[in-house]
Image (cartoon, rainbow, N blue to C red):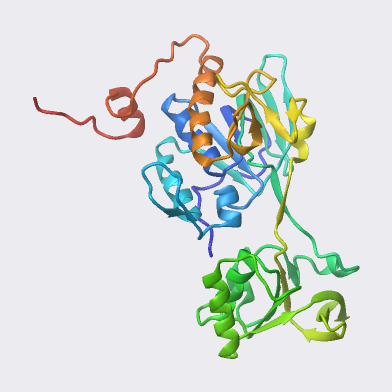
Amino acid sequence: MSPVTPPPASVQASSAPIETDAVIIGAGPVGLFQVFELGLLEIRAHVIDALPYPGGQCMELYPDKPIYDIPAVPVCTGRELTANLLKQIEPFAPTFHLGQEVQQLQQREDGRFDIVTGKGTAFIAKTVFIAAGVGAFQPQRLRVDGMDGFEDSQMFYRVRNPADFAGRNIVIVGGGDSALDWTLHFAQDGPHKAESVILLHRRDGFQAAPATVARMRALCEAMEMQFVVGQITGYEATGGRLTHIKVTGPDAVTRQVPLDVLLVFFGLSPKLGPIAEWGLDIEKKQLMVDTEKFSTSVPGIFAVGDINTYPGKKKLILSGFHECALAAYGAAPIVFPDKRVLLQYTTTSTKVHQILGVETPRFDD
């Protein structure tokens, strides 16, 4: 369950703005491939993402589920796709700024853009590429009065470091893939095995892979964990520490369940967030673009992937990859106004091979 490790991130808060050719907002598959397409044109990029690791929706929602529609790759997981994309962009050495959300984006008089994250990292960029998927993902919250006071101490919406929960009495709430995957992770033998695991869901039915559900039920049969049907309706605390949650079952009886840690997986809700305030043309929470270079209504700002909309738009990863190529060529005249940029093929171009750090193959007649 551990995320893919990216190249070293940049200093989180620089005293002076970082000047760059391009800033990519979003480190999902499309944002990562945008690095590649820009790199082929020798356009330097910094990548910003609100998540603490690259991969976007693939890593956050289905890291171990199969993807079947990546060209020439019959099947891969979201984790594998992310790892391969990171490997592919290594020659361009992009700088990652993870765990940061862009709060401000304004155009300067000279046409470049001022960008500031919530952690104070500032950029001056010639071009901006918004590859934010369907927006910044925010966890759906547990709505029980007073329990937000335990967030990040005993109640968590994400697992950053599984080792923190080893040997603990854990209650996991939810019925989707994340809840079931982490249940198995902590209930089974391994370095992160918990003292006890209780899975709590409002009904005896799941929106998760059938094989995963079957494994969970087998662990219950073996008394390695428990599954409880019900909802959290209250809690007990002693000395500022959460000691019990109150669970009301379908029989309307409320029972107290002891715990050390509560993990809540109700899913993630996409929010457009600050993007909505940047003066870009928006239609149904998506950025309107042309289909020549995938420019937004502000020249120099491009949008690729699920965040954009245009006639015939299909929300597919491979569609986003296509958009990245045209967006890169659309940005080149802005980054290099005095340079003629020609289409070059990675199979035959000596210049591209130099950029990628590979040898140009020689073919005998």
Q: Nearer the viewer, residue 320 or 105?
A: 320
- Position of 243 with respect to 119 (left or right) is right
Q: Percent x, y for residue 220?
A: 60, 86
**Residue 106 visible:** yes
Which residue is pictured at 46% across the width and 38% down the height?
93
Q: Which residue is drawn at 74% across and 34% down?
A: 275
Residue 134 is situated, as x and y percent measured from the top left of the image, at 67, 42
Q: Which residue is drawn at 68% across and 45% down?
A: 100
Picture quadrant of residue 11: top right
360 vs 291, nearest the viewer: 291
Residue 46, x across and y down, in percent: 56, 35
**Residue at position x 69%, y 20% in the image:** 298
Locate the C terminus by quadrant.
top left
How many numbered marks have been drawn onto this rendered protein structure? 0
Q: Please indicate whether residue 260 sits to the left or right of residue 218 in the image.
A: right
Res 283 → quadrant: top right
Pick the residue in front: 188 or 287.
287
Residue 85 position in % (x across, y down): 45, 44
Residue 207 vertical placement versus 19 (above, below)? below
The residue at the far right in this view is 145
Quarter where residue 279 is shown: top right
In the image, residue 44 sits, relative to residue 164, either above or below, namely above
Name the outermost residue toward the left.
365
